[in-house]
Amino acid sequence: MNLSVGIVGLPNVGKSTLFNALLSKQIANVASYPFCTIEPNVGIVEVPDERLEVLAKIVKTKKIIPAVVKFIDIAGLVAGAAKGEGLGNQFLANIRECQAIVHILRVFDDSDVAREGEINPKNDLEIIKTELCLADLQTLSKQKEVNPSVATSDDKKRWQAILKVKKALEEGREVRNLDLNNEEQEIIKSLFLLTAKPALFVLNMAEKEISLSEEELIKKYGLQEIRGIIPICGKVEMELADLNPQERKDYLKELGLKESGLEKLIKMAYQTLGLQTFLTAGEKEVRAWTINQGDKAPQAAGVIHTDFEKGFIKVKTVSFDDFVRLGGWKKATEEGRVRLEGKDYVMHEGDVVEFMFNL
């Protein structure tokens, strides 16, 4: 599955620095002036999953293939981007191609990194929110009003949904926060609106603040309207990127952290997109596969190969915990923990599976 997350924010909030740390190597061109990033940088990033190494030891394989997320570093937006200010039109088009958005909000103070005005993440977020709402209003302005005398029932419902969303956008309310019924959601989904995309919020801060709780950060920076804030220090993440795994653990322990900010970001991006993982474990490889929450067994099989979904017969499945506790397929089968499920089986997070199919 092609999972893509766009990293957005005003110029010089630390987007490219965080992107480089995300990839554990310098790919984006980092500089302390606006519009350094003109073409979006794309990186494929592993989803942290400690289960894979555990499975690899049990089935005695060295080949591990994790799930991945595609992150896109998009150049800085400015006020007026929806009207083409800065490089707005290009940037908005890049955001439109992503499945979710990560808002990077600057709260660090650094005289070496150019900044217009005071450090104010709330105002920064409002600027970006306004530009995305304006861009969505432009999209809706291209939709033609229906003629009541000839319009079908579906046409009228579609137009009413558009008017409802348009009114909300004009009031500065983002589409993802609206109370839409299932039919309205399907109608609006076809328009690919920017503010309908799931969003995450990263505070790029000084090292001394990264141990603050979400409640403390919300209160300090007046960000009561958002939840799920991820505190990250760009400089710390760049330092972590240069360390080996053990050194990273030691450094994080010194900072009083269990995992890096970027690890939290990757996991939350995965969760925000409504995804889950199933696992395959054999002598050739251990692998994590990405599916949507609620997918059934044939759909999961189709992620491995489309022919597997067409020829699906059964799935042999066992929970990760049982697989590990009993030491693999043989013992788990003997203990009756392995189940055979059919086409209606809804996949669970962490299922360890083998598919049976006809080609």
Image (tube, rainbow, N blue to C red):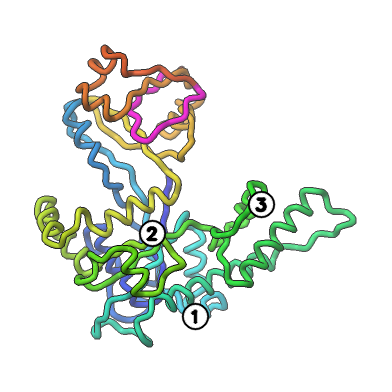
Q: Which residue is mark 2?
A: 228
- Residue stretch rendered in magenta on the structure: 343-357
Residue 40 seen in render: no
C-alpha span from label 1 to label 3: 30 Å
Residue 109 seen in render: yes
Nearest the eye: 74 or 213? 213
Please name which of the two marks, 1 or 3, marks the residue nearer to the observer: 3
* Residue 184's disc number: 3
Q: Which residue is mark 1?
A: 79
Quarter of the rendering occupied by the N terminus: top left
| First in sequence: mark 1 vs mark 2 | 1
SS at mark 3? helix
Please name which of the two marks, 2 or 3, marks the residue nearer to the observer: 2
| First in sequence: mark 2 vs mark 3 | 3
Please name which of the two marks, 1 or 2, marks the residue nearer to the observer: 2
Query: Hey, what amino acid is under mark 1?
Result: Ala
Residue under the image location 27 percent in, 54 percent down: 263
SS at mark 1? loop
Residue 273 counted in the magenta span: no
Residue 301, image x, y percentages: 43, 29
